[in-house]
Image: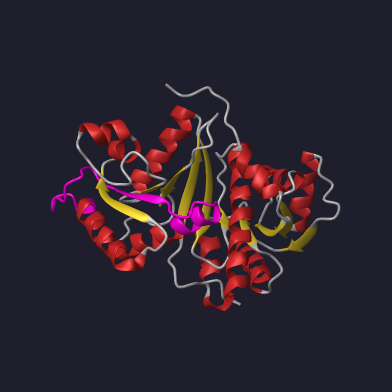
Amino acid sequence: MLSSIPKECPAYLLEQARQLPRVTTVVINPVNAVSLSSARLARDQGLIEPILVGAIDKMRHEAELLGWDLEGVRLVDAADETQAAQLGVGLVTQGEAASIMKGHVHTDILLRAVLSRAAGLRTDSRLSHVFHMTIPGSDKALCITDAVINVQPTVIDKLHIARNAVRLAHALGNAQPKVAVLSGTEEVNKSMPSSVDAAELVKLAQMGTLPGAIVEGPLAFDNAVSTEAASIKGIKGQVPGQADILLVPNLESGNFLFKQMVYFMSATAAGLVLGARVPIILTSRADPPEARLASCALASLYSAYCARQESAVA
């Protein structure tokens, strides 16, 4: 049942990102082959200008094994992953970098450094993760959120999660993304808390808390993505069958969903943590090169959008 179709980095993401200046990106503790090769790949593709923060001897050793001489690459020495996270985040605070890439560091250590009040990277938004999913041969993207950070989000948490995903959609040129708030049913049922949450979130959106998006729910997965299924069941609206963003009830459901797409459909899962002042590229050891490259392209486009927004406000 596992798909053998080769994965692809979406060509349109790369093309758009390559038209932008390289994003200076701190790579936190890239002391193994996977994280160093990710940084090198994105640099070679013209997406990022990496600053490698970690034990310099280890980074040089691993880079030598990869055949990368690190000429022209800025290196910052750090004793361990905790110090690497603090120093790397500090470079962003000082305005020397515009995005962060996770290297060989525990996610909680990295996010703790990002959320430190001293770092100044917090915003009014809660941190959340968005997977930008594409399948080979198609330019259609489907965003899944949150499958990584928020385990059992409340309605207010989901409002923040939705806002972050909508902002990403805007950065990619979708001015009015369609958000499906998922549950196991289209009816509000008190025995299914996700359906109650969905209805509450839709009401909040109708009050203007989620501008620039069409938000509908509760919707079961099939009706969110299939026009035919929605039609057969008589489910009307602007989102059924046309969802751009799937807001999942909890981390487990999102985790199952994105991995099913990866392993059964050869989908490429480009992932970012949003809600801080800069995007965080959260790569995994299991991610193929295509997904890591797509994540960097996504961060490049999002960073450029944020810079335009800040300039417009100023």
Q: In the picture provided, is 25 more to the left or to the right than 173?
A: right
Label tally: 0
Percent coordinates x, y for residue 265 in the rendering: 46, 29
Quadrant where the N terminus sits is: top left
> As drawn, which residue projects farthest toward the left?
190
Residue at 61 percent across and 77 percent down: it is 314
Residue 175 is inside the magenta segment: yes
Residue 39: x, y in percent?
70, 48
Q: Residue at x 74, y 63 (%)?
A: 77
Q: Is residue 102 visible?
A: no
Q: In the picture provided, is 38 more to the left or to the right than 219? A: right
* Highlighted magenta segment, given as a residue range: 165-194
Q: Is residue 207 above or below residue 63?
A: below
Depth check: give the residue in front, 115 or 47.
47
Residue at horizontal 19%, vertical 37%? 234
Q: Residue at x 63, y 37 (%)?
A: 11
* Residue 52 seen in render: yes
Q: Say which of 231 and 128 sits in front.
A: 231
Residue 269, position in %: x, y? 51, 41
Q: Is residue 69 left or right of residue 219?
A: right
Q: Nearer the viewer, residue 94 or 223?
A: 223
Q: Is residue 134 magenta?
A: no
Query: Toward which corner of the image does residue 228 lie, by quadrant?
Result: top left
